[in-house]
Image: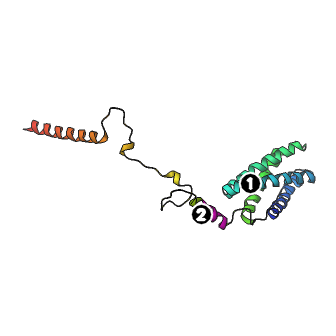
Amino acid sequence: MRNHGTAILVKFISLLVVLGVILWLNFDYRFTDVVLIVLVLTIVGYVLGDLFILRRSNNTAATIADFGLTFAVVWIMSRMLGYDDGIVAASALSAVAVAVVEYLYHKIVPGVSPEKGEKQETQDRHIRNQPFKLAWNQSPGHERLQTEAGEELTPIRPGAPSPQMQREYKKSVKVNKHNKNKNKNK
């Protein structure tokens, strides 16, 4: 069982430290504004990044999403809170720092990324729900990649001879040419 409260608290504290150093100390944001930005970023980032994106993809995709989310939240909230000078630089620096922290957060904090047992259970359930699987193709999601090709699938214009008739015709033409050459040589 995941403990969401602990994961959210760790995320909040880590983001508060990182954005406090960047926004409060370097860009002269008020501390209450930094706490408000971190609060919004923690809630939205946990729901979108950790519960939605990370569960369906991998750490890299979730970290990229956290980068974009951080840039947007810091920029928009800075404008809403009345900051005008250097908000693009503050947003970019914050996004890079938060992306690094989030990458490590997803790796370290238990309960954020699915555990091995949960991943295996999900794969087993996915395989059990498939109506038909070939023995060599047990990895989920690859059943769409099977193809089949044959002569009967070759497009032929209406009225054209079948591939077998075409082969027979080519053989007869070769035989006729061969016989014609023999007759000329005599």
Q: Is residue 107 above or below residue 165?
A: below
Q: How is the image coloured?
A: rainbow
Q: Secondary structure at mark 1?
A: helix
- Amino acid on which the number 1 mark rests in the picture: Gly
Q: Is residue 80 left or right of residue 161?
A: right
User: In this view of the protein, can residue 83 be seen by the observer?
Assistant: no
Instruction: Locate residue 117: give its quadrant.
Output: bottom right
State the image quarter where residue 49 is shown. bottom right
Q: Position of residue 6 (x, y in %)?
A: 81, 64
| Helix, strand or loop: magenta stretch | helix
The boundaries of the magenta stretch are 116-125
Q: Amino acid at mark 2?
A: Asp
Residue shown at 79% from the left, 46% from the top: 72
Q: Which mark is residue 124?
A: 2
Q: Which mark is residue 157?
A: none
Front residue of 159/90: it is 159
Please identify the residue farthest to the top as the structure is shown: 159
Please name the residue that numbered disc 1 is placed on: 49
Q: Please say if 100 is above or below 152.
A: below
